[in-house]
């Protein structure tokens, strides 16, 4: 993509005294005209690039604009490489290896050290996530609309969106864009998107604000829950909500208090603990759990399961 190529060209110029447009065109597999446009873009970005014609000429960064390698320590570079490796985990690129190759060309000691931080952003969904992320990246760069089926709590709907940002937050991937159906900016979870397609229809682009990703904004609390949990499920509470989410009650059970955004999700989560939790409040949640227990008793109270005849 263009931004990757611009960064790559800048890296080459920082590592070498000078280069040529044909050499850059061959390296990045584009035309000389494209390289010339890229050089113009870098100049517009404030990078002082000089070009000279004739024997011994070429493209170079003006003196005084060399990156001092002491600005970054080896440890800091390892953190940068860890970030690139994390992006490689959800793409078919090898940005980390390419950067290491470029840096080692100048100083192999600069990237020495063990890879002590390993981040996999794909979780269990790499096969489905990678094509979606690549499609969205391409659409964002080209300013093309994307279409997809979105499966939410209210059912499935067909969406057409102007994509602006791809985000990783709350252990999941999202795309932020202008939804033509809602006529507003929306945050869509990639795991709920199906049949993601980049169209050939371009959009002009808006002054897209950065999304407000504070949890209180995206997931406003609508219900405060207090409950008592059996001590043997403490590991689940700590894993999901942190070590300060509960305290020991006088009877040895764990007193838990938390605000929830979605009452239905909260109910499902509490039911997953079976008889190892007692909800204290709110009263309406206790009633919903009692109703769910009655329904389960009706299903499982029979000695034999209800047989459904097969065609």
Image (cartoon, grey):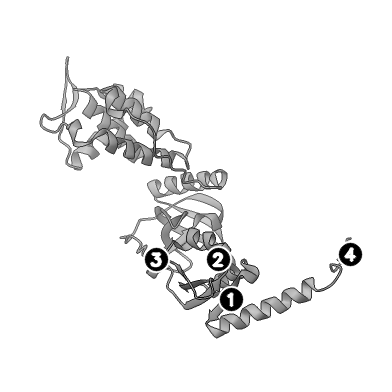
Q: Which mark is residue 231?
A: 2
- Number of dots carrying numbers: 4
Q: Position of residue 134 (x, y in %)?
A: 47, 44
Assign a secondary structure to mark 4.
loop
Tell me the residue that label 4 is attached to. 309
Tell me the residue that label 3 is attached to. 215
Q: CA distance from mark 1 to mark 3?
A: 27 Å
Q: Are marks 4 and 2 in contact (CB under 8 Å)?
A: no
Q: Can you see residue 36? A: no
Q: Position of residue 23 (x, y in %)?
A: 30, 21
**Residue extending farthest left:** 64
Q: Are marks 3 and 2 in contact (CB under 8 Å)?
A: no
Tell me the residue that label 1 is attached to. 278
- Residue at the spot x=44%, y=58% of the render? 170
Mark 1 or mark 4, which has the lower sequence index? 1
Q: Is residue 169 left or right of residue 123?
A: left
Mark 2 or mark 1, which has the lower sequence index? 2
- Residue at the spot x=49%, y=49% of the render? 198
Q: Are marks 1 and 3 in contact (CB under 8 Å)?
A: no
Q: Which mark is residue 268?
A: none
Q: Position of residue 276 (x, y in %)?
A: 61, 69
């Amino acid at each position: 993509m263009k931004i990757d190529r611009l960064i790559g060209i800048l890296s080459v110029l920082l590592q070498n005294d000078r280069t040529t447009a044909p050499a850059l065109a061959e390296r990045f597999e584009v035309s000389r005209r494209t390289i010339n446009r890229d050089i113009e873009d870098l100049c517009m970005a404030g990078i002082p690039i000089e070009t000279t014609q004739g024997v011994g000429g070429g493209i170079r960064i003006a003196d005084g604009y060399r990156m001092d390698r002491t600005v970054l320590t080896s440890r800091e570079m390892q953190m940068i490489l860890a970030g690139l490796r994390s992006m490689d985990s959800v793409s078919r690129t090898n940005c980390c290896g390419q950067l290491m190759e470029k840096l080692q060309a100048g100083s192999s000691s600069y990237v020495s050290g063990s890879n002590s931080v390993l981040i996999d952003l794909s979780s269990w969904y790499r096969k489905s996530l990678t094509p979606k992320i690549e499609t969205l990246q391409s659409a964002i760069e080209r300013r093309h609309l994307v279409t997809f089926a979105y499966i939410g709590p209210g059912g499935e709907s067909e969406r057409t969106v102007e994509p602006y940002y791809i985000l990783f937050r709350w252990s999941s991937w999202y795309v932020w864009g202008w939804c033509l159906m809602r006529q507003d900016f929306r945050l869509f979870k990639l795991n709920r998107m199906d049949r993601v397609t980049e169209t050939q229809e371009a959009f002009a682009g808006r002054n897209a604000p950065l999304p407000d990703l504070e949890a209180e904004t995206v997931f406003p609390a609508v219900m405060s829950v207090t409950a008592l949990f059996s001590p043997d499920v403490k590991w689940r509470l700590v894993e999901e909500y942190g070590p300060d989410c509960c305290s020991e009650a006088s009877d040895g059970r764990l007193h838990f208090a938390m605000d929830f955004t979605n009452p239905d999700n909260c109910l499902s989560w509490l039911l997953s603990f079976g008889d190892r939790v007692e909800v204290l409040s709110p009263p309406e949640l206790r009633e919903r759990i009692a109703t769910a227990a009655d329904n389960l008793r009706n299903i499982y109270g029979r000695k034999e399961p209800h047989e459904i005849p097969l065609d």
